[in-house]
Image (tube, rainbow, N blue to C red):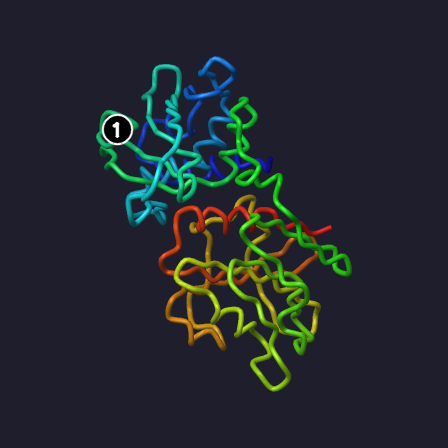
Amino acid sequence: MRRLVVVAALVAGTLVAASSPASAKGPTEAVLRGPGVAGDGVATLGQYTAQDLAMATSLYSMFSGEQAPSRLVEREPRGALGPRYLVKFRFGGDGPRIRQVLYPFAEQGPIAHTPGGQKLCAGCSATSEGWFDVRYVALDILAAYRVPVPSSVSASEWPTARDDAHGLSISYPPSWRAAPSTLTPVLADPIVPLAVGTAAMVPQKLGECDIVAQHAVEAVGPTDALVLVYLYQGMASWSAKIQRPLAFGPDLAWHNGSVQCTEGNRDATVRTLNFEDGKARISVMVVVGKDATPQRTAEVYAVLDSLRVE
């Protein structure tokens, strides 16, 4: 499991700057209760694991105010929620206790509910009630405490697409598919060695748009998703201000403006992100349907987290 502690600490420092020093450092431990936890239904998580779980369950978004993008889910989840897991995060020895309720196996994907009226300190604003998205890394934490996680939702069990020529790989849920070859065969630099998604992926042809997999983008429906991995090889202009994130999510500096050859799909949003991973210069394009479920959104970030550069 990739470490999220550095990210969690930075987010905590930004989002709760007005709180007490103890709470600004993030949770010092957490108590997890629910079916199957540690065999008898309860376990105490140490500081690092508690911070990882807090990051994965959008805990910090509860206190973001206007300082950072929120991961609040726009609609209440539909369908069965499944087993309920209660987490109480402790901030310092005598600090506040913040409650979250996790539904990791909900029909529409992992999601968390935060009760309203909670405070990080006496002078802090109280949280509002809401539903928040949950990263798939939370399922890894639950599995480590003996919660039976179905293989279909465990990212460690997902199939993997590989590009051995460039040392790249990416994993994807069983309900997704991988393009058998590049979707932009005419494009020399950058190249698109990997593409995974839930809709049809038809390659571009000679004389069609050569920089973007236009057919695949236009095939993305209201509940679909598509992830394209671009690899720059030195001929095309490219710039990036960040190293590869420890964890992908909505809080990053995504480019949300117009992208060539993607204007024809009004059912989806298109975002891109440039970053360096070692010596590799990479750009990812993410296309997500406007009615995508919380599960689909969580899958997209888990897919990006699985990207490996050898």
List x then y, in percent, for residue 35. 44, 21
Q: Which quarter of the image is occupied by the N terminus?
A: top right
Residue 4 to residue 180: above or below: above
Q: Could you tell me which residue is drawn at 64 percent across and 66 percent down?
A: 192
Considering depth in this image, is 173 or 86 the residue closer to the camera?
A: 173
Q: Could you tell me which residue is drawn at 50 percent across and 40 percent down?
A: 136
List x then y, in percent, for residue 155. 58, 41
Furthest-top residue in this view: 40
**Residue at mark 1:** 118
Furthest-bottom residue in this view: 207
Q: Secondary structure at mark 1?
A: loop
The tally of labels here is 1
Side (left or right) of 289 relative to 228? left
Side (left or right) of 2 relative to 126? right
Disc 1 residue crowd, few under 14, some 14–19, many 20+, Cα 10 Å: some
Considering depth in this image, is 232 or 82 the residue closer to the camera?
A: 82
Residue 267 to residue 307: above or below: below
User: Which quarter of the picture shows residue 77?
Assistant: top left
Identify which amino acid the numbered label 1 is placed on.
Answer: Gln
Q: Could you tell me which residue is drawn at 55 percent across and 22 percent down?
A: 146
